[in-house]
Image: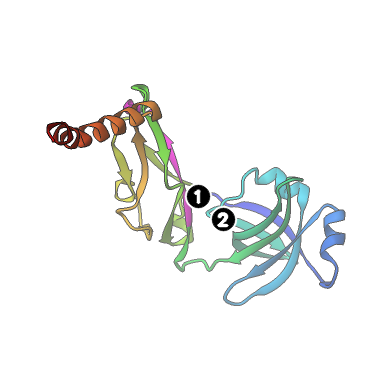
Amino acid sequence: MESKTLTAFVREERKKAAKRLRREGKIPAVVYGKDVNLPIYVDEHEFNTKFHTISENAIINLKMNGEERDVLVKDYQEDIIKGKILHIDFYAIERGKTLRTHVPIEFIGTAEGVKLGGILETLLHEVEVECLPKDLPDKFEVDISALGVGDSLHVSDIKVEGNIRIITPEEQVICTIAHARAEKAAIEEEVTEEGEGPEEEQEAEE
């Protein structure tokens, strides 16, 4: 996957500087890893322009003080009401060494079961993987078009290319096509009535 560049600046002042930085349109952050633990900040406008969504599998080429580091966003704090990122934790990755992170799942197609009135229930939105940085995919595409009502897809159904190992248990369900609620309720009611039948007959005989 391609990496995006982002300019960062070292934070010389640490105490009570976060609020001031946010007022100035900057996002306080930290870079940590095997050989680094550095407080920094990035420009809020630049970050929001380049990253419309924050994903843990996006490799970012961080440029600061004439140096470059490849990093991943490992965590962030957000003011949901204001829609502002308050703080970011960047993890410095080592080129040539395997890393663990999460990759999102994207569904392709429309399930046959949905066309017949079923409901797509998503149980897993991403999976944990282990691979080299150069092999890290943007996403895993999963074709659901053949799924009928009652069918499910599991992690084992994900097609993996290259030297990528999925850590998430393969038996975990990604999605399922459930019966429509009204239909499901009718089936459950029918099963209940069938189960109560013999007891009612016995009572009548007594």
**Residue 130 sits in which quadrant?**
bottom left
Range of magenta residues: 102-113
- 185, above or below 14, in the image: above
The amino acid type of the residue labelled 1 equals Met
Residue 63 placement (x, y as % from top left): 70, 60
**Residue 8 sits in which quadrant?**
bottom right
Whether 161 is among the magenta residues is no
Q: Earlier in the sequence, mark 2 or mark 1?
A: 1
Residue 149 placement (x, y as % from top left): 30, 31
The residue at which mark 1 appears reads as 1
Residue found 46% across the figure and 50% down from its top: 126
Whether 109 is among the magenta residues is yes
Residue toward you, 105 or 175: 175
The residue at which mark 2 appears reads as 59
Residue found 73% across the figure and 65% down from its top: 66
Question: Label 1 neighbourhood size at 10 Å, few (<14), some (14-19), many (20+)?
Answer: few
The amino acid type of the residue labelled 2 equals Ile
Q: Which mark is residue 109?
A: none
Relative horizontal placement of residue 141, taking residue 61 as reference (left or right)? left
